[in-house]
Structure formats: structure tokens, C-alpha cells
Amino acid sequence: CGTYLATASEDASVIIWDAATHRCLETLTGHSRDYECLRVAWAPPAWGTDVALLVPGSSKAAGDRDPILASAGADGFVKLWRKSDGKMKCFASKDHSVIADEPSGKGGGDDKNDNEEIMAEAEAEGEGYQIYALQFINRWHHSASPSSTSMDVDRPQHAILTSCNDCVYVWSLSKPPDGNSEVEFDLSAVMTFRFTHADSANGGVSFRIGDEWFETSEQGMLHSSTTEKAFGGHRNPDNMVYVFDSSYNEANGLLGVALSDGTLRLVNSRGVCVSVLSLPGCESHLTSFSWDSSGTRLVSCVATGHMVLWHVDSGDGRGQIRVECTSVLCGGHEIGRPIFGGRYIGGKDEDLLLSWGVDGKLCVWDSRSRGEIYQPIATLVGKSDYPIYAVDVAEAAEGALIGRIAIGGGNDGGFLGVPAFIYDVKQKEDDFGMVEAKENDSPAPAK
């Protein structure tokens, strides 16, 4: 929400707004109107406006770069958009329903087969192929397959991360096959990760490079969990494992995946599950999680209204990861109602943490808290009739705590649609350590 704000809508459209004037600049259509649009994500500036920037060795002046946007829908499609002739046009697209229906090869045993059957039933009922993770990656450290003899095992590249059902996909942009003129670029699979129950081999993680599936024999520091009890509550009585959120951290080279079984699994680029994070007694699913920029901290959000802070130590130089639970944030939001997201903010050191949820609250916390915490530093927004599903932050110049925050969510909005709100957030001068949010003039209505 710096210069532009993009909103994903229930009517499958994506709307681009001017964050300063709140004007609607453009409405993008392309996802099936039978499904909602679930995610939008802006590409980092390095991706540029010219698709030539996505080819190694090309160059373009920074001032010539225009934004690239990705959108993901419950129709199973991910679409990439860029400006052409003054308008945003789709230049690449990937149908996850085709990928998800491909055979998953070896790995997973009975758990894998059970999960595939349940997924197939959900897809037949029109509930499959929902894409919950969407991320642009500047430097994906791709490892060669275990059977490869190549020494070129670390080739940083631009990549796009998505998830669908029980898989996380890493894609790169490539030219489409000859004769395919429908899109300018194709999304080619770099690596696929598939998840099942955590007490399976390699922490329940298998992976694919090319057409070959693998289960690594390398050992990470794994936590075993039982699958005897249903996790995710009454909505998931069959113990189906699927991905709610996923994010890659370029600083530590780890992929984090929040799953329906209440675990957060950390996987390296060789496909090794190096850690399975969960709290004893927690039988609810994770809704999301977030890394800090250094890759040494992360927060997991639980559907019970709690957040868990973790410290990640990967400094032994041998690939072993040690993870410690440092704090449980159990106040601020209504207990028993899901928290939908958390984000580290507050300048270079990221001393603050934002959280938002179905209770309509946007809270700010001390991101370096220890132990059990029952109260946030401040509640910036409290709208009980406006569940908050997504938050974006544009931090102000150095020295300011936050800057500008955009929130999206709400229920049915009637004729004018559901509004998205933009707030200016600053530290109050009369109260040490307190922050406040002021609505930035009128909200921008989102369809």
C-alpha cells in the first residue's frame, strides 16, 4: 500500500487503487466468476516491467520499471499481470487443477493414499484447488536432485511460490512451448513439495524435481506427532493434511509451511524437513505464519486465537536447525476465534508485530516478548462487524515506527461493496511506547 493498493474480491476481480487519492485505477478480470479471488501479491522492484528483466543477464534502468502483480483464485489459477499499452494485462498463467491431478509418485504410504482420496472428493464437490500461498522470491537457492551428479547445486534465481491442497510449488518464468500464443510466458516447475502426516518419513515431506519424486534419507531435527486424534476441529474429521500458508525466507534458505494438522514444518532446498514445530495439546490448525527479515524469528497463528513466537538458530554450519518457542501471545484477540495473520514491522530491527483476525481487531505487540503475554501494546483497529482477512504495510521513513497500513476483509457490503481501509499509524508523542492509527480520509470501497 505504498503507491498502489491491490484488493482481491469475492466476485473474482482484482482492483488496483491509488493509495494516496483512493481512486480506482483499474479492474482486472480473468479468474472464474464461479470462485473468489483469494490472494494478490506485488513483485519486488527487481522483477521490473519488461519481461526481459526476468532473463538472467538482462538490464533496464530502475526508473523504467513498472509493477508486476500476481493473483490467485479458488479456481486454481495463478495469473501474472504487467502493464502493456498503458493497461495491466495477464502475461502468464498456471492452472493448478491440472497439476494437482497428476500422480504424485512414490512416498507417503497409506497416509498419502488416504489424503489423495479425500482431496479427490473435495475437488469433485467444487472445493478443491484453492491457492492460499502466493509469494515472489528474488533468490531461490535451488538444489539439484539427489540423483544428479551436477556440482551446480546452488543457483539463485527468481521464483514464484504457490500452494494448492497438500502441495507447495516453486515456479520459474520461461517461454511457452512453440505454437502457444495464448500467453507470453509459462510457469515452469522448479520444485514441488508434498505434505502428509508428520510422523511419516522425512517429517511427512516428499518432493519432486522434474518428473521424479524423492524422499530424502537425510535426517533433520524432527518432532513426531500422533495422528490418532482429529485435528482442525469438526471441519476436518478425516485428518486431511493441507497447506494453509507457506513462505520462503531468503536469509536462511528455509521454506516454512503452516498446515491443517497444527504443525509448522521447516524444509530446506534439498527437500529435508529440518524441523516440525507444534505445541503440546494444540489440536487446532494453523491459519498462517510469518518470518522476520533475518530468518531468525517467526510467528505462527492458531485458529484458537493464539500466536506463538519462535526463535530459529541455524548457526552450527552443518545444516542442523534448532528452534525454540519463546512466547505465546494469548490476549488481545478473542479466544476461540481465528487469527488470520501476523507481520513483523517497526524499522530495521522489527521490534513490533502486527496481528489481525476474524474479531475485527488489528493489534500491535512487542515482537521480542518472552513467556505468556496476555495484552498487546495497543489495539489499533477494532471493528467487530468487519473481520480482517488481509493486511499490507508501507513503513515510513527511517525513524518512524510504522507508516501506512491497509486492511481488507468485511462481510457482504451491499450495493457499494465491501470497503478496504487505509490508516496512517504513528507513535503518540504524549504516551511513551504507544501507537495510534488514524483513518486515512475515506475508505476505498472494494467490490
Image (cartoon, grey):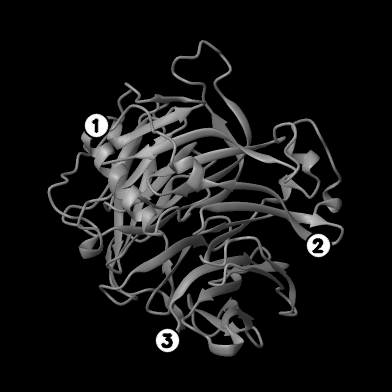
Q: How many marks?
A: 3
Taking depth in this image into account, of 283 and 110 the one nearest to the observer is 110
Q: Which quadrant is home to the C terminus?
A: bottom right
Residue type at the position of mark 1: Gly
Residue 433 location (% of width, % of height): 48, 75
* Residue 87 circle label: 2
Q: Nearer the viewer, residue 137 or 78?
A: 78
Secondary structure type for disc 1: helix
Mark 3: secondary structure: loop
Would you say the residues marked 1 and 3 are in contact, meaning their CB atoms lie under 8 Å apart?
A: no
- The residues bearing labels 2 and 3 have C-alpha atoms spaced at a distance of 35 Å
Closer to the chain start, of discs 2 and 3, is 2
- The first of marks 1 and 3 along the sequence is 1
Callout 2 amino acid: Lys
**What residue is shown at x 28% (from left), y 49% (from top)?**
118
List x then y, in percent, for residue 222: 26, 35
| Disc 2 residue crowd, few under 14, some 14–19, many 20+, Cα 10 Å | few
Name the residue beneath numbered marker 3. 385
Residue located at (41% from left, 68% from top) = 365
